[in-house]
Image (cartoon, grey):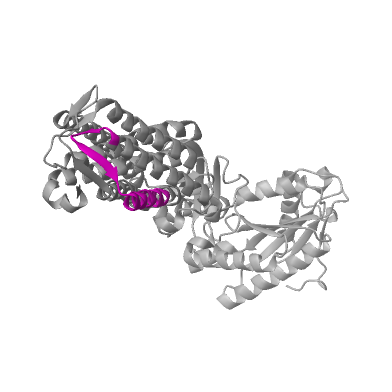
């Protein structure tokens, strides 16, 4: 009588032992890769991945067992019953399928551990069925304590391996899961073999109808091992394709965020640059934690304009598009973020230039026409139009030069901005012509007060610059009770302005709405009244 454990070093071929461990590791790695796909894929494809993983796991466990058996040479012939050998691989695959299917339908830690325990029991069952296939001139028995320990360790490690596959993520799942599955198989086999007792008996003859010798079994194991390698290679190819896809994604100038169940599960390199956050910090966040919408569109529906949230620590405007895709076999969405900070800044500059006078930065003539027509048709009838013209401005250009003239125009624009308040709008219509639209105030009192303030400020400006010969005249038109078009109101204000100039310049005139339109146009003084000298002193 002798124990196999006592002669491992002398009667086992180290090359076969190393080969069996290698087969186990490769098979375990392929198994975890397939199980990872089962975790991540769409529900309709999960059963397929579980079946593939079961086939890989069952075959690798079976190949590990028989490759380890081939490593032993006890000095007597050993063969294997074909039926029981075939049955052992079926048991191995079925045990893996049952435990994987149960484990991936459960979410509680206890249920997952129980599924892993069932996986360990399945490995033990395969081992003992395989050992029963041994055909040799010897009596076979087991030491109960050692065999019990082997099964117990197998169940415990099987539970841990299933927990690792279900609970861990990414590389940790692959490495830890593969190592634990390998430990489960190898611990069961070699610990159980330590409790195996073979008593040689030349009188024992084979009663098997169909047996396979060691050479044939080695060929079968080689084929099974090759199949595992092929599965491993396929997994590597898939992983390489995913790597290539990631390379393409990283080449994008836009931030890509893959969303699974509304949470970020993958990002490209530009996403980290755009947000200023590391990939690990982005994974698990919701997209609305990164982007605050500034448009009317919801973030998860088509395109939207937004700004990066304070979480990122960056101030940037972004444009986002969301589309549904299938990513790694599961239904996902991809959010594409584009930094439009510079574009929006340029758009604002262009829009400002289109609406404002380049010299004075007041609203331009086109904006004047648009606002005047809109206000004339608005319900609020308390509208006054002040048309302002600089008196003797040509002399300023002739004496001081155009640079001095431009400086005066800018200073007059500043006066109009400072004097206007509330909803008042100031415009440069062209040359030395300006206008103010005043709304929401009692008329014509408010417009006269504003005109007095403007005239005084311009008079002070002309004195300070040494151009006392230039000043300003202002014509005012108030929107009548019966609405008129903007062009008509502008014409009335111009009439009042011309009357102010005719009155000696530096004057304010208000168009009288009591007369008819035909009688009011022109310089008919009865229809144009001036500001009393006691009210304005120029």
- Seen at 26% across and 35% down, the residue is 228
- Which residue is nearer to you in this view: 435 or 77? 77
Does 310 appear above or below 305? below
- Which residue is nearer to you in this view: 17 or 22? 17
Does 31 appear above or below 479? above
**Does residue 447 appear left or right of residue 303 in this picture?**
right
* Percent x, y of residue 279: 40, 55
**Does residue 95 appear left or right of residue 111 in this picture?**
left
- Which residue is nearer to you in this view: 109 or 305? 109
Mark yes or no: residue 256 visible: no
- Seen at 55% across and 45% down, the residue is 304
Does 516 appear above or below 509? above
Q: The magenta stretch spans which residues?
A: 132-161
Magenta run includes residue 156: yes
- Which residue is nearer to you in this view: 269 or 118? 118
Give the main secondary structure, helix, strand or loop, of the magenta stretch. Answer: helix
Q: Residue furthest right?
A: 514
Q: Residue furthest top?
A: 209
**Does residue 84 appear left or right of residue 390 in this picture?**
left
- Seen at 50% across and 42% down, the residue is 321
């Amino acid at each position: 009588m002798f124990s196999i454990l006592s002669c491992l070093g002398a009667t086992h071929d180290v090359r076969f032992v190393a080969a069996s461990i290698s087969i186990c590791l490769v098979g375990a790695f392929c198994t975890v890769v397939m199980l990872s796909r089962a975790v991540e894929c769409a529900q309709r494809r999960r059963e397929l991945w579980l079946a593939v993983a079961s086939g890989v796991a069952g075959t690798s466990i079976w190949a590990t067992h028989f490759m380890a058996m081939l490593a032993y040479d006890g000095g007597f012939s050993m063969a294997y019953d074909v039926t029981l050998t075939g049955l052992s691989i079926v048991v191995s695959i079925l045990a893996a399928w049952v435990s994987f299917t149960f484990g991936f339908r459960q979410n509680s830690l206890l249920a997952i551990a129980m599924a892993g325990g069932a996986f360990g029991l399945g490995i033990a069952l395969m081992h003992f069925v395989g050992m029963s296939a041994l055909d040799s001139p010897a009596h076979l028995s087991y030491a109960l304590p050692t065999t019990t320990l082997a099964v117990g360790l197998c169940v415990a490690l099987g539970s841990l391996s299933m927990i690792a596959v279900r609970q861990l993520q990414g590389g940790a799942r692959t490495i830890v899961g593969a190592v634990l599955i390998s430990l489960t198989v190898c611990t069961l086999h070699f610990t159980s073999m330590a409790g195996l007792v073979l008593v040689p008996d030349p009188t024992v003859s084979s009663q098997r109808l169909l047996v396979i010798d060691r050479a044939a079994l080695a060929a079968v194991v080689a084929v099974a091992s090759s199949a595992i390698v092929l599965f491993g290679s396929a997994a590597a190819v898939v992983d390489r394709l995913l790597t290539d896809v990631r390379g393409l994604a990283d080449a994008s100038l836009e931030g890509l965020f893959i969303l699974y169940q509304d949470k970020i599960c993958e990002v490209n390199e530009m996403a980290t640059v755009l947000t200023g956050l590391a990939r690990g910090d982005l994974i698990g966040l919701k997209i609305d934690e990164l982007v605050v919408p500034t448009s009317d569109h919801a973030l998860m529906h088509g395109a939207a304009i937004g700004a990066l949230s304070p979480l990122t620590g960056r101030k940037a405007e972004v444009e986002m598009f969301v589309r549904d895709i299938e990513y790694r076999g599961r239904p996902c969405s991809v959010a594409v973020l584009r930094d439009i900070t510079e574009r929006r800044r340029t758009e604002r500059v262009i829009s400002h230039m289109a609406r404002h006078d380049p010299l004075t930065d007041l609203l331009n003539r086109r904006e004047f026409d648009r606002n005047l027509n809109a206000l004339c048709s608005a319900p609020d009838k308390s509208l006054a139009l002040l048309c302002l013209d600089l008196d003797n401005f040509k002399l300023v250009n002739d004496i001081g030069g155009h640079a001095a003239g431009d400086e005066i125009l800018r200073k007059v624009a500043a006066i109009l901005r400072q004097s206007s308040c509330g909803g008042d709008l100031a415009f440069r219509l062209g040359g030395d012509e300006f206008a103010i639209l005043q709304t929401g105030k009692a008329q014509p009192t408010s417009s006269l007060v504003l005109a007095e303030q403007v005239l005084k400020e311009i008079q002070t400006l002309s004195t300070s610059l040494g151009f006392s010969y230039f000043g300003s005249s202002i014509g005012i038109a108030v929107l009548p009770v019966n609405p008129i078009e903007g062009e008509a109101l502008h014409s009335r204000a111009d009439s009042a302005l011309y009357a102010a100039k005719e009155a000696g310049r530096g004057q304010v005139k208000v168009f009288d709405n009591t007369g008819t339109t035909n009688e009011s146009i022109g310089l008919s003084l009865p229809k144009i009244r001036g500001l009393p000298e006691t009210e304005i002193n120029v």
